[in-house]
Image: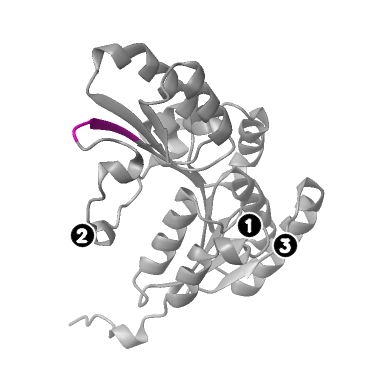
Amino acid sequence: PVHSPRPSTIVPHRIAFCITTLEPGGAERQMVELATRLPSERWEPRLFVLGTEPPPTKRTLAKLAHERGLPVEYLGASGLWSALRTVGRLASRLRKFRPAVLQCFLAHANVAGALAARRACVPHVLTGIRVADRRHNWHALAARQTDRYVERHVCVSEAVRNVAATEMGLRDEKLTVIPNGVDVERFMGTKPISRESLGVSEDRRVLLFVGRLDEQKRPDWLLARFSEVARQLPQHDLVIAGDGPLDSNLRERAQDLGLRHRAHLV
């Protein structure tokens, strides 16, 4: 009879993750959650961050990785001019770690990871395409140039996959969709807050946006659309929760649209 090996004899596969920074963000949290939730008897993860260690006020995810025992190495990239040096540094770290798989997240890490993995002879290389970002043509060009070194491109949604195929020019057979996982236990004990704490009367209904106030997320589009239908929704207020470069612009726009009492940025 053939006996299965005992768990103690199984050697975990080494898997490397690579991301641009580890400051708080959706993609960054997803990577930490993925890397720290892999079964330890099968996988030995390590995270390589292209940038520097986050400042003390933005180390939430770095602390989470440390608490869960995920080794993190920062490569110290500080801009475009250090890109080639960072690729070489990453390749050196990958040679030393010798992972079976490299999974990258976000455009800069996708490119640097593919190039470094090529030098380090990593057997399986996957990128992570998180957004349908049409603002930076170099993202698409760089992805096409490094596609030959990548086994699969993991897209976060069907919409992102469509953009990757039609606008970025990546081969459809290499595109795989894996939606974000959500840790629902984080929210099981959450208690509702009062509408009044958001500046909204308790008798009002709320349309809610939560996210980074950045052009990529289009909160400006949402505000404009709300102004068009505000009269048809007399019982509704719009609440925009988040922070980012569009914050002051959105506040001014809400005033210009006459939504000072209907649109609330918190």
Q: In the image, is residue 17 above or below residue 225?
A: below
Image-quadrant location for residue 86: bottom right
Dot 2: within a 10 Å radius of its alpha carbon, few (fewer than 14), some, or many (20 or more) residues?
few
What's the magenta region?
203-208
- Precedes in sequence: disc 3 or disc 2: 3
State yes or no: residue 205 in magenta.
yes
Image-quadrant location for residue 92: bottom right
Which amino acid, mark 2?
Met
Q: Toward the viewer: 77 or 90?
A: 77
- Precedes in sequence: disc 1 or disc 2: 1
Comparing labels 1 and 3, the label whose residue is closer to the camera? 3
Q: Position of residue 164 (x, y in %)?
A: 50, 31
Q: In the image, is residue 71 above or below residue 235?
A: below
Dot 3: within a 10 Å radius of its alpha carbon, few (fewer than 14), some, or many (20 or more) residues?
some
Q: Quadrant where the N terminus lies? A: bottom left
**Going by the image, does 36 lie left or right of 92?**
left
State yes or no: residue 79 in magenta.
no
Please give the residue where the numbered disc 2 appears in the rendered image.
Answer: 188
Q: Position of residue 160 (x, y in %)?
A: 44, 33
State the CA–CA distance, disc 1 to disc 2: 40 Å
Q: Position of residue 261 (x, y in %)?
A: 37, 26
**Residue at 79%, 53% in the rendered image:** 82
Comparing labels 1 and 2, the label whose residue is closer to the camera? 2
Please give the residue where the numbered disc 1 appears in the rendered image.
Answer: 117
Label 3 secondary element: loop
- Mark number displayed over residue 4: none
Which amino acid, mark 1?
Ala
Label 2 secondary element: loop
State the CA–CA distance, disc 1 to disc 3: 18 Å
Label 1 secondary element: helix
Please give the residue where the numbered disc 3 appears in the rendered image.
Answer: 76
**Residue at 67%, 69% in the rendered image:** 93
